[in-house]
Amino acid sequence: MQLNPDYFFNRNLKLGILGGGQLGKMLLLKASQWNLYTRVLTQDREFPLQLACTELLSGDLMDFDTVYDFGKACDVLTIEIEHVNTEALEVLEQEGVIVHPRSSALKIVNDKGLQKQFFVEKGLPTAPFKLYKSKDEIIQDFENGLLHLPFVQKSRKGGYDGRGVFVVNTPEDLKNLIESPSVVEKKIQIVREISVIAARNSQGQVEVYDPVGMEFNPEANLLDLLVFPEVLSARQLEQTRSFAIELISGLDICGLLAVEMFVDENEQVWINEIAPRPHNSGHQTIESCITSQYEQHLRGILGLPLGPVEVKVPSVMVNLLGWPGYSGKVNYENLGLVMKQPGVHVHIYGKNETRPFRKMGHVTVTHPNPEEARKIAIWVKNTLKVTSL
């Protein structure tokens, strides 16, 4: 089906979104601005998405019949989380539903082993790796001298937000290996972790946002602080841009693709993982860029011209994580104090219950001086505490 902007802006086209988390909420806020008819399938009805979408349904995203029946009532179908039933998406594509990202791309993305193989096939730099069926195979290779410390084990499927990743530094760590088919890769001596988000539409137009620098909470392995734009050398900027374009084009993705990368001690850039959807490393584009990642994703999946990605103002983003030691009905301490500060943009996701390190919101600090933005962001991180009543 050839999409006609007049058709869907008059509320005739039904846009389906698989997943009802914070990424879906922010995508819906932009869709509602355009008066799009939106349907959401979510496994968790806690989020107040009914305020932004036309229809909200509850169901298992991994169940074939649930996803198929939901998708049949949509003209265009997209995701805000990649763990969905790809077989149902494949059938929907065959029956004429426009699905972005396509099921073929999702099958690669949902298996970290296939991801790594795809990087190698494209000649893109990624840490040396080997695929294993079980932890016993890993231990056997280590004992036979075929595997050397340190290394990183990643579950091939199901990992998300740091889960399914285990770093092995000592022989004692081997007893805690993950019991599942895995990717084992050489541990890169990481100096910086960065992310680049690319966007593409069905006409082949591609736009790439400036890189962001990512700093992680060491206890929870979740993004803690995000610096935008990250300062890289001209060579590294060109590399990250070309890697992102190669991947989004090679996977034939319309919409967004986030590419997480490492920079090592020799300034070499390595590709880590990819995600074909709006991404945590792109929240700051709402305030910092001419076109936010959420608007860009809609433009890409609906076949619209992509928007400009130039930076309006530098920013630093802080994830609002549930404070350690607190669980229950959420309470935001010092929210009013934080909002007195100019350039502070608070986003509350609407989750009623908090627990340690749960993502409850984010704050983007904008300032013409990146160092000043960082200082304010660190103050926000230490001042705005997500506790419980």
Image (cartoon, rainbow, N blue to C red):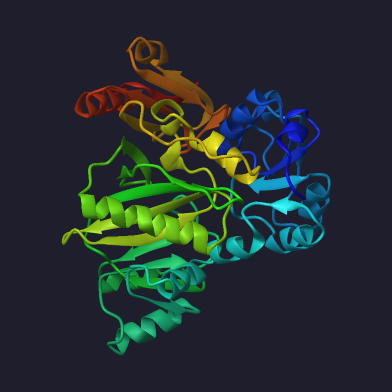
Between 314 and 226, which is closer to the camera in this rendering? 314
Depth check: 374 or 31 in front?
31
Residue 283 x/y as whole percent: 45, 34
- Figure check: 47 above or below 19: above
Residue 93, how many percent across, how many down? 75, 59
- Of residues 196 and 133, the one nearer the viewer is 196
Q: Position of residue 275 (x, y in %)?
A: 50, 53
Residue 300, by quadrant, is top right
In the image, taking residue 170 as reference, residue 104 lies left or right, namely right
In terms of image quadrants, where is residue 101? bottom right
From where the camera sits, is residue 101 visible?
yes
Asked whether residue 321 is in view, the answer is no
The image shows residue 31, relative to residue 153, as above or below, that is above
Q: Residue 231: which quarter of the image?
A: top left
Q: Nearer the viewer, residue 261 or 347?
A: 261
| Residue 236 pos. (x, y %) | 25, 54
What residue lies at 36% left-to-right and 52% top-to-bottom? 241
Which residue is at the far left?
Answer: 266
> Does residue 112 appear to the left or right of 268 in the view shown?
right
